[in-house]
Amino acid sequence: MKRVLRVGVIVLLALALVGNAALGVGAYVTREPAPGPLTGSRIVTASRPAIVLIQANYSLSASLPSMDMPQSKYDELVAQVQAMYRSGEISTLAQAEHAAINLVLANPAEYYAPGTSTKGGFELFSTGSGFFVTEDGYLVTAAHVVTPDKTKLRDLALTTYDDPTEVANNKKLISDNLLAGTGLTGELSLTSDQIDSIYNFYRSWLTKYLSIDSIDSKYYLGSGTVEAGDHLTANGIRASVVSIDPTSTGHDIAIMKADITGVPTLQLAAGPPHFGDATYAVGYPRQGYAQESVPLNQTVPATLSGGKVVNIEQHGDWTAWGSTAVFTHGDSGGPVLGADGKVLGIVSYSKVDAKGNQVSGGGYFVPSEHIAADLASKSIQVNTNPKNLTATYYRALAEGDVQRYKPELLLLEDIRGRSPFDAYVKDDILGTQSEVLAGKDKTPPDLIVYIPAAAASGFGVALLAMFVWLGIAIAVHRRRPAIAVAAAAAATTVEPTEAVAPATEAVVGFSQPATDEVSSPQEVLRESEPVAQSAAAQEAPPTPSD
């Protein structure tokens, strides 16, 4: 009976072990897939939701003195015309007016001087890139992206007069005003050379006398494929500047705070770059066509430029690192990512040749150690949570790599629920849903949910086996005294006789020999000694008589 129970217990334990082992193998097979290799494409795909276009809208209050002809210059002009009349060069009033205009247009600077200032304004904007470092909306960009510089903005304001349409309109306006002042609009016309002369003078007047009195700045953020200009002004996320690490005397770093939470973030590299490191610069470059200026309203996607660290340039006590990646207008402030997807630095400036093309290795970035220091000075901690939005996106991409589209969809839905700002997740969800509907999903059954139950059942089987084994041990222990008594009686009989045979037969009547249940003779004697003495006194056979 005991052997049967033992075999049963062993079978139960074996079944429990085999079942749990099979479940463990299934759980291993269905575990979360390992991340795919971090190619440049994968890094950009996972990082771009945290990268934004930053548009700076500047309202400039400006002043410009009027072009006045002093009385002394007017008297001089009249004297010249009178001399021409007396010499016979002109003889009518109309000819006198023509002569005066010709004299002025031949050399406008000789007759005009600054007069009373008039007020005006310009609406200008510029763009750059940036990236979020906290999910509650702190982001980093280059200082020059969000630092209004009067000199540069003045130069930018002057370029608005170089637009071909603007030039044509201004030439006509100046010509009409000049003729209207003479009262001879029906009898006098200006040649193209004269119009060019007066316009060029007007343009040089602007360059010399235009002043910027005040600047009002507003900043707007966009992500995904951004419609810069008026559309972003109307629909972008507002942001403000928290701190400036100046371009000229510092590290060209700015920290901003956006009016939004739940945004994907990027982590900073723990150490400095090294020569030969891969670099992936991601930003929103904006360029005009050929020599044309950048249009106000333009659709701008995020763009990758890959390269390697090949150069350094010293700036006082800090070092800028040069990459073969191409940095252009609009990339400033964007992240330079390393081979692990972390931020090596921030795009700052580039060196160009005579044609305006970046020289090889001439794209420079500020290393992340200075970004970390600026953030620490404002008590801003970069998001390193392993379950942050970007890390979750990497996991979703890994699921998609092995066509586990259902768990990928769950992760993408989690991102959408946590991040209303993510401009890419909606399209990702639609694409993943299409794969599921097309029957391409290869998600294995989810066995993980059964592990607790399997563990509990295994524990229950083990506990049952323990109780059965314990029951056998108790039963055996209860039988030991009787077996020991018989053994002791047999051991104390000097000469076995037929009278003790029944006791011996009773002992061997058990299913197992008594000797199977004892470990040594000493044990038998120790456990049965008191009983054996009593039994010997009462049950010893009488001594035969003569």
Image (cartoon, helix red, strand yellow):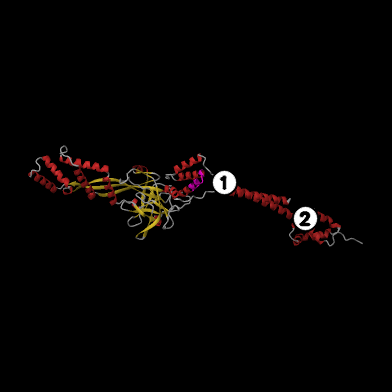
Residue 131 lies, in percent from the top left, at 40, 50
Residue 147 lies, in percent from the top left, at 33, 51
User: Going 12% across and 40% down the picture, which residue do you hit?
Assistant: 94
Q: Is residue 534 visible?
A: no
Q: Please, what is the three-letter code of the amino acid marked with disc 2?
A: Pro
Provide the secondary structure element on which disc 1 rests: helix
Asked if the magenta segment contains residue 62, the reply would be: no
* Residue 449 tag number: 1
Quadrant placement of the C terminus: bottom right
Q: In the figure, 525 relative to 467: above or below?
A: below
* Residue 178 tag number: none
Report the label total. Answer: 2
Say left or right for 479 vs 444. Answer: right
Provide the secondary structure element on which disc 2 rests: loop
Residue position marked by numbered label 2 in the rendering: 513
CA neighbours of label 1 inside 10 A, class few (<14), some (14 to 19), many (20+): few
User: Going 49% across and 43% down the picture, which residue do you hit?
Assistant: 409
Residue 375 lies, in percent from the top left, at 40, 55
| Extent of the magenta region | 395-405
Say left or right for 426 vs 233. Answer: right
Asked if the magenta segment contains residue 401, the reply would be: yes
Is most of the magenta stretch helix, strand or loop? Answer: helix
Q: Please, what is the three-letter code of the amino acid marked with disc 1?
A: Val
Q: Earlier in the sequence, mark 2 or mark 1?
A: 1
Q: Is residue 479 visible?
A: yes
Residue 49 lies, in percent from the top left, at 42, 47
| In-front residue for pair 116/126 | 126
